[in-house]
Structures are given as structure tokens and as C-alpha cells.
Image (cartoon, coloured by chain):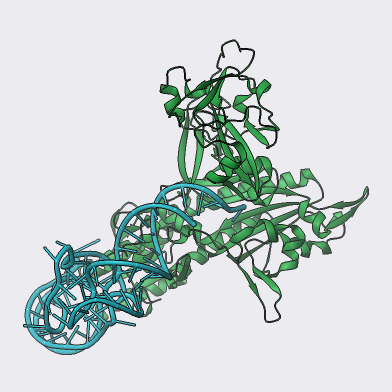
Chain colours: A green, B cyan
Amino acid sequence: MRWSNLFVPTLRDAPNDAVAPSHALLIRAGFIRQLHAGHYSMLPLGWRAHQKVAQIVREEVEAIGAQEFLLPTMHPAEIWQQSGRWDTMGEIMFRLEDRRGNATALGITHEEIFATVATELSSYKQLPQIWYQIQTKFRDEARPKSGLLRVREFHMKDSYSFDVDQAGLDAAFDAHDAAYRRIFARLGIPAFGVQASSGAMGGNDSVEFMTPSDAGEDDVIRCASCGYAANIERATSTLPAIDDPAPADAPEKFATPGVLTIAALEAFEGGAAADRQLKTLVMVLDGAITLVVVRGDHQLNTQKLIDATGAIEVRPAEREETFAALGANPGSLGAVDVTDLPVIADLALEGRTSMTTGANEDGFHYRSVDVDRDLSVGQWADLREVSAGEACPNCGTELDVVRCIEVGHIFKLGTKYAETFGATVSTPDGEVPIVMGSYGIGIGRNLAATVEANHDENGIVWPVEVAPFEVVITAMRLDEATLGPAEHLYDELKAAGVDALLDDRDARAGVKFADAELVGFPIRLTVGPRGLENGIVEMVERADGDKRDVPLGEVVATVTSRLAALRATMPG
RNA sequence: CGGGAUGUGGCCCAGCCUGGCUAGGGCGCCUGCUUUGGGAGCAGGAGAUCGGGAGUUCGAAUCUCCCCAUCCCGACCA
């Protein structure tokens, strides 16, 4: 390919709404353009890199035996109604009607569809199977952001495993885990696995692959000592034991005029330290007012509440709803003696006594509250959000919080979809539902994550396997004396299987060099009269700036060996 | 959805507060000449409903109201 024929609209300045490094660089280097929020056009360089990411993913999942499909992205509502997710998916799913008025959805994922196909599996002898596709997904994200990192229309590789039993599922899961680690290594993305909430998908084991980045949107709790790592939606920690004073016989109500916050009650004469208080949150779970109680110095993690209750829609109660339910305003709320509303309490409160909490009467609190005795707790659950500095649940080391991009997610579905859609196989012991697993990886997001992890002040530094071209040949003049040898080199490299680009633009050297660095080709060859006089070209490596003169006759051998070396040294 | 910010040629930005000739600069683009190993110089040129609508005014990029879009933080989210 000749650069003079390639559409590569590079920009000296990034559009001012591109903030994340990958976003700004992919635009500046001419890889992508935005159509509207969350929808991007892939330009020729962007599409090449995108396809290279997809190819790596394809190779690694095929290496574990996966077979490629292509399923429709428009789905009839019925299939989603059958699994129950037509309702539970909420607004994330784009919905439309066809001309007959039939409800239709744009696929956000394909468990239902693959499970339907899997109904044709009839014997355990056909298992195991791993099926996958690389297909457009549509998600009506509330807040698309950071370029390709969070979009509403994107390609995802989603694979599904089908096994006769749990042991088979475990094996398929572990195979995907290993395949994903190889994928991230090849993409130059330093990713690690964390325990995750399985969210709306259902299922048990759930591992998200994360890579640290300020542009991310997940917080991960990590232990530097033992390797414990979990999404903050799932993470736990060990709390220091607290010795409560001997409990009184009954709660004691006392006046607390003007005290509306945990902090104010700490400072109040006769108040209590935050870890001796109960924080009562009034939440609405699928329309039902519910009291959620955590320790005064703890934060509720909403996802944990959702996971614990199975609720679909969760929101804080309005002030009016709260007053109607408890007869008091925020600042004086409590769960003591509340029996007409569900009460869910955090595990950290089990067995606590002599606590202080609102009395459901403005301006009054209770002290000497015994949680087990005075609260009608209907459900105990891990609800509190772990904070940095708390102790690792495994080894006690102080935990860190790391902002991350989720680059992959694998989890065990079990038999839910197989049962719903009747995907069963015959075994010697009778008919059993197929045990499924689900494994996703976003192509565009990983492209962006690669850039997040591989760039410098001059532009992108592509790993060899993802670079839109592996080598750019910069022709310093366009006369035959220079362009001739440059073209010859280009032909030789192509013949040797190297993905090369010939920069034959009528532009100044500085422009060509700067563009080559911005776009991020791993290797650049400078072909100009100065070197040709001595029978050499200059070779520059993007990653470390290493320059060397290479005799014309050795260029192909040198380039191919350097490319091989660069492939082998990918981090991961 | 809550909070904050921004919309001026393809990109970056000035002008707005304090209303006043043909809306200005840089990059990019076109033409010519010179130049040619790290984003060239000179000369000429094209390109704008100032996000949209309504209003105030003799006069609106500038003031007022409504709407839209985009970005950031949060909520939400396989």
C-alpha cells in the first residue's frame, strides 16, 4: 500500500472533547472518527488494527477448539421474553418494531440465540462444544465515553461453551481463562483477572480481566502481597474486631437537636463514634421501600445490594417516600422496631451491641441499640464497599484500589439458558440440560486499551501484531533514484510476508517522520540519497527509538528478525 | 438520570463580560515561485447559516428565553 493512496487524516491537535489518551490518539492518527455519541467510523488504519485484534482473538479461541458462527443481531422479542431478560435488561437494550408492529431487539449479547441453536445438540457424545462469533452488539449506554472504551455499537467476540456436566464447564472456563491471558499478552495489555459480580447475566464463577487505566470505569481492590483481586462490587476485607460495651436492657432515646449526619453525631455530646453508629438507608427495590443498614463509617455498594436481593431497579427513596414510611426525615432515621418494612443489614453489624442510630423522630436518636435484639433483620448480606487501606481477607495486607478498564469477562452460566430453551442431551443416565459458560471480549475496547497501554508523547506505539502496518518505508525523495530502491524494498518485504506501507507522499521529511510516529508503526525505514550513496537505509524502532544503518541487501533479513523479536517480547 | 462545562470554516483558538463597518489568527486545503534528512518561506486564493429557534434592539457571535448536541464527574451498565 502506498501512503499517497491511503486515507489517513492525521491531525496536529486533538479535538478538544477527546480526553482519554487512546481517544485523542486514535483520532489524531486518523484511525477513527465520531459519528455521534458512542458511534465511531473505523477509517482504513482503524479497521486494519481492529481486524488484527479480532484475528488474535480468533486464533486464540480456535486454539481451544472454538468454532466460528455469525448470528443475527436483530432478535425477536419472544426469545428475550422467554429468558425473562426482555424485562430485566431495561433500557440498555435497543428496541424497535418492524412494519407489522412486532417487537424486536438489537442484540446486546447472544446467550439466548446460541442456546436456541444448541437445542439441536442431542447426545452427550456431541459435547463438549465451544461456539463463538465476532458480531456487532448494540447497547443503549446511558453514558458513552472515552472514545472506543465505552460505546453503543461495537464488535464483541462472544463464545459459549456447552458441556454435559460441571467438570466440563470448569475445563472450558479454565481454557478460556488461559486463552484470554494469551490474547492480552499479544495485545500488549497488562491485564489480570479479578473476582466479579455476574450482574444481570446470572451464574456463579465470574472473572473479569482488568487493565489499570485512569480512563477506566471500574474500581478494583487488589492485594499486593497475596494476589487477591476483586471488583469493588464484589470485594471484601477483614475488619478489626470491635469490643462493644456491655449492652443495656433496652434502647434509650435521647434528644439530638440539629444533628443530621454521622459526623455531627460523632461530635455531639453523648453521641458515638461512626463505627458505633448504624446508618439507615431507605431504598426502593423494584418499587418496594426497604431499609438497608450499614455501619456508620461504611458506604453501601449498590451492586452488592442488587446481587443480594435480585432486584432489578434500585434507587434511593425520595424524601417524601421516606417520611411517609418512617415518619421522620433523613438524619433521624433508624430501623429499631421497624417490622412493617424489609430490613437488610450488612454482615459487619452481626452481633453488634450498644450502637447509636436514628429514632425515626426528627431530633432524636437511640443509644444502647442491640442489633440482634432491636432490629428485625430479614436478610444479612455483604453490602459495604471496601476502602483502600483495609485488610486483605486472605492475608491481612493493606488493600489498594486501582482504577481499571474491563477488557474481558468470563463466567459460568450453568444450566439456566439450557433449561429455558430446552437444550438437553441424552446421557446413559437420562436427559440432562447442557451446562453453559459465556465468555466475552470487546474488540474495539481492547484496541483502545492497547493504545492506553502503549503510547508516548509522540503518538501510538503499536505492538507488532496489532499495528495497521508493521513497517513504513519513508521515501525521502520522489525521483527514480530514491523511489526506485524504496519500491524495490517494499516489494521484497511484501514477498517476505511483511505488512509494509510505502510513504511516497510529496511531503517534507519532518511531516513524514512525525506522522509515522503518531500512527505508531513498529519499524520505520528511511530510504534517501544520503544512505543510498553508501548502500544503506536507516532503520528506526518506534518503541525505543533505536536507530541503525542496514545495508540494502540485509534489510529484509534484519526487519523480519527484528519483527520476530518484537513479537516475542510483548508484555503480559 | 443528577452535577459541571462547551458549541465560531476540516482541526485548534481569539472575539462575547462592555451589542456597531466586509467575524480574526494558527494548522490544514488550492495556485505559483523558492526550498528539501525532523511538522519550510514568500505571494495569491477558496472555505462560516457564529449549534438551532424565538425574543430584545435602529443594529446580535455578543443580551434574554426555549431546544439540541458533545464532553467531564457521579449514578447506571454483559
Instruction: Specify the quadrant of the image occupied by residue A63.
Output: bottom right
Q: Is residue A458 left or right of residue A233?
A: left
Percent x, y of residue A533 = 21, 70
For image coordinates 60% across by 40% down, the residue present is: A304
Instruction: Specify the quadrant of the image occupied by residue A563.
Output: bottom left
Above/below status of A142 relative to A215: below
Q: Does the rendering let one see residue A273?
A: yes
For image coordinates 64% across by 61% down, the residue present is: A109
Q: Is residue A466 left or right of residue A380?
A: left
Q: How many marks?
A: 0
Front residue of A161/A571: it is A161
Above/below status of A212 relative to A424: above
Above/below status of A269 relative to A207: above
- Split into 4 quadrants, where in the image is the N terminus of chain A? bottom left
Percent x, y of residue A80 = 72, 63
Percent x, y of residue A202 = 69, 49
Front residue of A142/A358: it is A358
For image coordinates 38% across by 73% down, the residue present is: A490
Percent x, y of residue A416 = 77, 51
Front residue of A265/A36: it is A265
Q: Does the rendering let one see residue A493?
A: no
Q: Is residue A3 left or right of residue B62?
A: right
Residue farthest toward the top in the current orientation of the protein: A246
Front residue of A512/A197: it is A197
Q: Is residue A48 left or right of residue A63?
A: left
Above/below status of A389 relative to A29: above
